[in-house]
């Protein structure tokens, strides 16, 4: 599949290049940089402009502008004396809706905003008025979440890319930010504008070198360091490069172009273009996890019982037999159940100690028949055969679930899992995917170990500990 | 002309949820209920305020954020629609308000003389921030008094809480001097919550109170400490522990609103009246105030 990204741009959101470019030579150069980018955008084959603005903070998840024709006369809360900014934009509401869906499917909290008078931030207004003055291409505008860190921001970027791919659209990606962001704290004469400090200027120029070499993912990897060195913590931390790299493909393969770099009231303003290219530094081994689904703090309002319902609704096939839970009291703390395969030795399926239920090593064999879903890993002659570890893993978890249910619990009460794989290289990724389907919201601790063999011809076995409610 | 006076000062937080739950005609979304303890707190505040003659409300708002200096609304009349950028589903409020530009300019001038960086906001298209609107509405729903709105200079972000507090001391003293010279009777509002860690999800029915609670216990303990100090008349101590409070409780007081209020009131030793405390989407909010005349009458 070809890339859904036509070009990427980084532009400043401070309004001087829009409102008073004539008052400072550098502001004028930035305005020209916007103009150069505008021409490239108009000549591109992109269907839509995707704007991520660091000047639109959100608290409750991620917001996506979905008003088809937002219209207002905007005034910046700080530089109100420079004048008003009337705008009327065209929004791609289909893509906004798709992005909302892909975000939710990846564990994010997101919502579309479609309200007359919603305050579109100064940065988005400046970017769209200068890059797309006649609304030749529709846009989608995204917020920057106050609490989101790297994992969440990357997932939001991937959600955007997935939405584009699903709709078969090609996008211009625009990130609204300055490089260094320290404004002067006193009013200045426009002609006296400069980068706030030589240190900020040096860092900015180093970043420009990276961008000119097309090294977007490398800049993303440096985000925390950049924040520490040249960013004041305003409403949101420095996170846009995580998002931009994720949406553009997480690599360093771009033709970079710095259209303009100049001070903007002390900050480092730059108009930078990144065009996907086969050349470039290429993909390297990166030093942090590459996250696909967000699993963090997104259910703080949901009770445990609701989580249990959600989990079971999402991940549990309707195969469990109903029966009254066993009464595991102190006098008889041992559980043997027909919902799990017969033990291959002198041990019960589970044993209760205090509030904890210790579950014996559990394989995928089917209760009653002993059949192995996905097939055994070797035939009767000991010859290796192909098998389906996904089916085996699913069956293991169903067996664990059966034991839990017979004890009056559910999978949601599992607090610790030890998993044994006979072929880690072959099976880990598939096992891990199936595990995530069931356990993402349960948050049990887990250890996965590689072993040479199991007593029966199976590829995977779990040992688990569950906890009874207090 | 008689000397002007600050007749009351309130901690008047601005969660849009309270307006949403109150269902005033100006707000588009409608609710069934919600956050009653805080709304009843505002009711008691209004009852106390109804016993006082005053001319103007002065609001310091965290949601008018100015990184260069402190700004003051400088246009006599504003009429527009305010949509909360974070909770647009709850707050779309049609406002129509008057500004006491003369007093705003007087505070501006006093502040400038004290060495602060200041600016008047003269653009008639400017949209008044929702913090100012919400705190003003909950304090005075009839909108029959003009307001002065003061922006939040983000010194905490640029320097630290100590620098912010130094500036707020100057701004508070300048506010008091300007009010006294004006001959007007002013009510001050610090438009901020206390602890300020939000939930990152929202209940399907926003006013579902079974979902509402403080974000974590540590926040609650810090909020109680601040309230306890206020109730014991220890305003100076609140000022002193402000840096630690802001760091530990991620408090919205980092905007300077409470520091400004306490300085304007000259660090009252009278006990604050607590009207109500409650959480809103996890943040801690107290409605409380100091009314010097009431205290004098009781003595």
Image (cartoon, coloured by chain):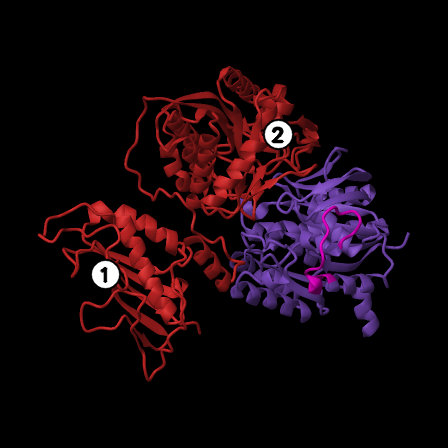
* A404 shown above or below A235: below
Asked if the residues shown at circle 2 and circle 1 are in contact, with their CB atoms under 8 angstroms apart, the answer is: no
| Percent x, y of residue A239 | 46, 40
The span picked out in magenta is B23-39
Q: Which of A235 and B115 lies nearest the eye of the viewer?
A: A235
Q: Hue of chain B? A: purple
Host chain of mark 2: A
- Can you name the residue that lies furthest to the right here? B1
> What label sits on residue A370 in the rendered view?
1
> What label sits on residue A125 in the rendered view?
2
| Percent x, y of residue B54 | 85, 56
Asked if residue B291 shows in the view, the reply is no
- Residue B33 inside the magenta-drawn segment: yes
The mark closer to the camera, 2 or 1, is: 1
* A187 shown above or below A368: above
- Can you name the residue that lies furthest to the bottom here? A331
> What label sits on residue B79 in the rendered view?
none
Q: Which of B38 and A22 lies nearest the eye of the viewer?
A: B38
Quadrant the C terminus of chain A occupies = bottom left
Asked if residue A30 shows in the view, the reply is yes
């Amino acid at each position: 599949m070809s890339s859904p990204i036509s070009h990427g741009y980084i532009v400043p959101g401070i309004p001087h290049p829009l409102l008073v470019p004539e008052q400072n030579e550098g502001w004028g150069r930035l305005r020209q940089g916007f103009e150069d980018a505008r021409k490239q955008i108009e000549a591109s084959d992109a269907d839509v402009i995707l704007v991520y603005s660091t000047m639109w903070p959100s608290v409750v998840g991620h917001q996506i502008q979905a008003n088809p024709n937002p219209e207002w006369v905007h005034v910046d809360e700080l530089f109100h004396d420079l004048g008003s900014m009337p705008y009327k934009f065209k929004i791609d509401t289909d893509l906004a809706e798709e992005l909302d869906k892909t975000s939710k499917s990846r564990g994010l909290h997101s919502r579309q905003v479609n309200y007359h008078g919603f305050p579109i931030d100064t940065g988005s207004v400046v970017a769209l008025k200068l890059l797309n003055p006649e609304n030749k291409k529709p846009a989608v505008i995204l917020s920057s979440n106050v609490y989101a860190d790297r994992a969440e921001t990357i997932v939001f970027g991937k959600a955007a890319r997935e939405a584009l791919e699903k709709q078969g659209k090609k996008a211009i990606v625009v990130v609204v930010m300055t490089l260094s962001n320290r404004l002067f704290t006193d009013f200045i004469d426009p002609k006296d504008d400069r980068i706030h400090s030589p240190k900020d200027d040096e860092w900015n120029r180093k970043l420009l070198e990276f961008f000119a070499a097309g090294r977007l993912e490398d800049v993303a990897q440096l985000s925390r360091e950049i924040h520490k060195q040249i960013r004041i913590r305003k409403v949101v931390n420095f996170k846009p490069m995580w998002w931009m790299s994720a949406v553009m493909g997480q690599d360093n393969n771009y033709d970079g172009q710095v259209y303009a770099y100049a001070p903007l009231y002390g900050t480092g303003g730059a108009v930078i273009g990144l065009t996907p290219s086969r050349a470039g530094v290429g993909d390297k081994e990166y030093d942090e996890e590459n996250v696909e689904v967000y699993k963090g703090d997104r259910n703080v309002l949901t009770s445990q019982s609701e989580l249990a319902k959600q989990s079971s609704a999402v991940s549990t096939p309707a195969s469990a037999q109903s029966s009254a839970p066993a009464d595991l009291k102190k006098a008889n703390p041992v559980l043997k159940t027909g919902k799990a395969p017969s033990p291959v030795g002198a041990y019960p399926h589970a044993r209760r100690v205090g509030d904890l239920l210790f579950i014996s090593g559990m394989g995928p064999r089917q209760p009653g028949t002993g059949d192995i879903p996905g097939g055994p890993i070797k035939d009767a002659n000991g010859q290796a055969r192909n098998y389906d570890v996904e089916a085996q893993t699913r069956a293991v978890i169903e067996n664990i679930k059966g034991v839990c249910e017979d004890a009056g619990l559910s999978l949601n009460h599992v607090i610790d899992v030890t998993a044994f794989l006979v072929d880690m290289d072959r099976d880990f990724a598939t096992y891990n995917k199936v595990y995530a389907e069931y356990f993402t919201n349960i948050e049990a601790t887990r250890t996965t170990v590689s072993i040479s063999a199991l007593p029966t011809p199976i590829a995977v076995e779990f040992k688990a500990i569950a906890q009874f409610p207090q | 002309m008689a000397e002007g006076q600050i007749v009351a000062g309130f901690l008047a937080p601005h969660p849009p949820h309270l307006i949403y739950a109150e269902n005033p005609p100006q707000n588009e979304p409608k609710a069934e209920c919600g956050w009653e303890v805080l709304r009843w707190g505002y009711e008691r505040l209004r009852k106390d305020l109804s016993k006082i003659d005053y001319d103007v409300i002065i609001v310091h708002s965290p949601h008018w954020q100015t990184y260069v200096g402190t700004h003051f609304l400088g246009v006599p009349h504003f009429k527009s629609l305010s949509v909360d950028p974070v909770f647009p589903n709850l707050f779309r409020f049609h406002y129509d308000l008057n500004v006491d530009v003369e007093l705003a300019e007087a505070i501006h001038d006093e502040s400038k003389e004290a060495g602060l960086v200041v600016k008047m906001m003269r653009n008639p298209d400017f949209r008044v921030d929702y913090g100012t609107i919400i705190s003003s509405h909950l304090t005075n729903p009839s909108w029959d008094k003009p307001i002065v709105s003061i922006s939040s200079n983000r010194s905490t972000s640029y320097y630290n809480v100590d620098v912010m507090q130094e500036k707020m001391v100057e701004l508070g003293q300048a506010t008091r001097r300007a009010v006294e010279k004006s001959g007007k009777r002013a009510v001050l509002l610090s438009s901020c919550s206390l602890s300020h860690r939000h939930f990152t999800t929202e209940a399907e029915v926003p006013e579902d109170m079974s979902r509402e609670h403080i974000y974590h216990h540590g926040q609650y303990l810090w909020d109680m400490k601040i309230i306890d100090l206020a109730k014991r008349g220890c305003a100076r101590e609140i000022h002193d522990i402000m840096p630690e409070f802001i760091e530990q409780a991620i408090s919205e007081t980092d905007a300077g609103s409470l520091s400004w209020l306490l300085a304007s009131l000259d660090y009252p030793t009278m006990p604050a009246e607590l009207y109500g405390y409650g959480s809103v989407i996890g943040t801690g909010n107290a409605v409380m105030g100091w009314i010097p005349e009431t205290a004098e009458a009781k003595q």
